[in-house]
Amino acid sequence: MSKSALRHLPIMHEPHGPMASARRIAAMVERYIYLIRGSWVRIVELIYWPFLQMLMWGFLQVYLAQTSSLFAQAGGLLIGSVLLWDILFRAQIGFSICFLEEMWARNLGQLFLSPLRSGEFLVALSVMSLIRLFIGLVPVTVLAYFMFDFNLFGFGLALGAFFANLVLTSWSLALFSTGIVMRYGLGAEEFAWSLAFIMLPLCCVYYPVATLPEWLQPLALALPPTHVFEGMRALVLDGVFDGAAMWRSLALNFVFVVAGIGAFRYFLRSTRINGSLLTQGE
């Protein structure tokens, strides 16, 4: 085609505005929903691991309640910790798996060549992390009530504060881990699966901060989930909701999320400069 003919071709403009952005986000969410609906194995996996953990720790708590005065007085302490930790882990892994689906399909480069913006992509991944979380968490929460007489929703409005803070932490971890995988390829995929577990000992999921050595306690208190689990224990053991702890967790989460977004943008820019966006692999 001649240059003169090219000049007369219509120019395709990228659609702008909130509605166009919302349509692109909705299209990505719909894509991931079709992936889940198209495979019963994916649906079973969303429920299987939370259910298995709930059973194991639930039966352990039943045993401890028979032999320990603490657990006899504070029924649900262990199951509550397990379910709250699962909110953090499942939201983080739900975000990461949707991202990895694009890596496994060698589709990430094509997405960024489309009108889809990186921010819209991250919003879609965040929405899907919530959808995947609810698919797995709701049945397990119901089963915990019937099997162990533990009602997660008995936390009342405090559950909303716990949930919001844990999900924000999970997204910040997912932003960092997916950025690493995007930059260094699927050989770094282990970061997406294990990053949350690196924090597990310091988040004081199953024990109070005072259990840690004194030199480790400031590091634990610098992590947002620590304040959530301390708040959960205060609510279960003393019947007191520690609002100040939730605000501290929220403030720390703000720092974590900003750092996560900055890390993702840095790795995305580095990947583009490195020229590896279209050649993702091991």
Image (cartoon, helix red, strand yellow):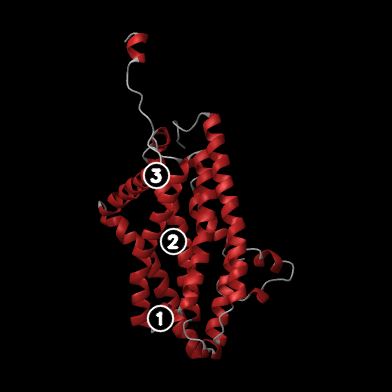
Q: Badge 2, how many Cα within 10 Å: few under 14, some, many 20+?
A: many
- At label 3, which amino acid type do we have? Ser
Residue at left 66%, top 75%? Answer: 211
Which residue occupies the foreground of this view, 65 or 225?
225
Q: Earlier in the sequence, mark 3 or mark 1?
A: 3
Judge whether 266 appears above or below 30 on screen.
above
Q: Badge 1, how many Cα within 10 Å: few under 14, some, many 20+?
A: some
Q: Position of residue 177 (x, y in %)?
A: 53, 49
Label pair 3/1, CB-CB below 8 angstroms: no
Q: Disc 3 versus disc 1: distance between alpha carbons?
A: 39 Å
Residue at left 45%, top 48%? Answer: 122
Q: Secondary structure at mark 1?
A: loop
Q: Secondary structure at mark 3?
A: helix
Judge whether 149 appears above or below 220 on screen.
below
Judge whether 123 appears above or below 247 on screen.
above
Q: Position of residue 109 (x, y in %)?
A: 42, 34
Q: Earlier in the sequence, mark 2 or mark 3?
A: 3
Q: Position of residue 193 (x, y in %)?
A: 48, 54
Q: Secondary structure at mark 2?
A: helix
Residue at left 51%, top 59%? Answer: 170
- At label 2, which amino acid type do we have? Arg
Front position among marks 2 and 3: 3
Front position among marks 3 and 1: 3
The residue singled out by tag 3 in the image is 21
Residue at left 41%, top 73%? Answer: 54
Q: Disc 1 versus disc 2: distance between alpha carbons?
A: 19 Å
Label pair 1/2, CB-CB below 8 angstroms: no
Which residue occupies the foreground of this view, 117 or 199?
117
Q: Which mark is residue 108?
A: none
The residue singled out by tag 2 in the image is 90
- At label 1, which amino acid type do we have? Asn
